[in-house]
Amino acid sequence: MKFNIKNIIGAAAFLISQGMAAQFYIGAQAGIGNIQSDFKGTVAGYELGGAIKAGYIYSLSNHIGIGSGVEFSQYKQDVFLSNSSVTLSNYEIDPSGSAFVYDVTTANYKEKQTLHAIQVPLFLQYKTNINKGIDFNFRAGAKYFLPVNYKIKATANNVIGTAYYPDVNLTIDNLPEYGFGVNSDYSATGEYQTKGIIMSMFELGFTFDMGTKNALYAAMFLENGYGSILDQEKDESYIGYNPTSVVDRKANGLYSTDKNAKIKAVAFGVTLGWNFK
């Protein structure tokens, strides 16, 4: 990545070294976690996502502070083909070394996606007192978003895999011992290859003193990723080619059909935390 992650790590190390002057916090956030994609021909059903977090804010003045920490987040969604009868194609090589066009058509294809990630935030906080024991807070900054795993579970009523050999103008659609034909009640798991990206982050909320050294923090947040978490060297069929059978086909996932697809995380919702002064 062009962004130098050493800057974030260096700033975090400095804040840790100043830990005696820092305000520590723990918390959780929940809301809509969306894995956005520019991949055409798919629709996604969103689910609630969330994160747990811990960190510290070092005060530069009465109103300004700089913060960092670590977070563990989860995103979940179901992805479908917008046209259930569409045929997606890519090139494959058979055991003899001959290239062919591999056409895959599915019925009622569904892909359950689960993304886990570690996030390292670096942000500025502005706060001001608006009433006795109540502060207004605004946080803005960036996060390094590092996927830990991006797993998928694919299902379909049936999968039809056919081969077209353009050199000899030959189509094979029913040769199951060589991986061509119909497979009913398809189910398989897989995982996308990923890389880290940068996210912007914004929080707007309030702290409520719960004593001389503790405070409750409540806020709304918005996070948006830049770049793509997909890290793939070549295009692949979303349901893999098995040269010996029509069963046990690997689930590569819909996004694998375009290695240049931009896949990023976007989230918004509410944050609840506890500050230790």
Image: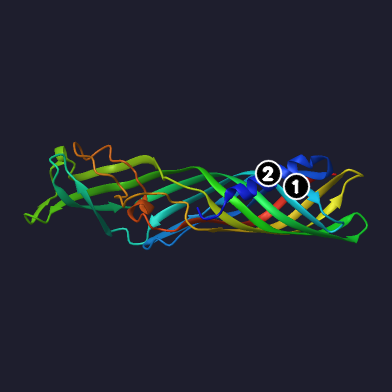
The one of 122 and 182 positioned closer to us in this rendering:
122
Choose top left, top right, bottom left or bottom right for residue 139. bottom right
Residue for point 42% across, 49% down:
231
User: Seen in the image, is 268 located left or right of residue 75?
Assistant: right
User: Seen in the image, is 27 located left or right of residue 164?
Assistant: right
Residue 147 point in image, percent of width and height = 52, 45
Give the total of numbered labels: 2
Q: Which residue is mark 2?
A: 53
Q: Which mark is residue 184?
A: none
**In what quadrant of the picture does the C terminus appear?**
top right
Which three-letter amino acid code belongs to the residue tagged 2?
Answer: Lys
**Cα–Cα span, label 1 and label 2:** 9 Å
Secondary structure of the residue carrying tag 2 is strand
Q: Is residue 276 visible?
A: no
The one of 75 and 92 positioned closer to us in this rendering:
92
Taking 258 as reference, is 154 above or below it? above
Residue 218 point in image, percent of width and height = 76, 53
Residue 182 point in image, percent of width and height = 21, 45
Which three-letter amino acid code belongs to the residue tagged 1?
Answer: Gly
Q: Which residue is mark 1?
A: 273
Q: Earlier in the sequence, mark 1 or mark 2?
A: 2
User: Seen in the image, is 76 located left or right of residue 220?
Assistant: left
Q: Specify few, some or many for label 1: CA neighbours under 10 Å numbering under 14, 14-19, or 20 or more.
A: some
Q: Specify few, some or many for label 2: CA neighbours under 10 Å numbering under 14, 14-19, or 20 or more.
A: many
Residue 168 point in image, percent of width and height = 6, 54
Q: Are marks 1 and 2 in contact (CB under 8 Å)?
A: yes
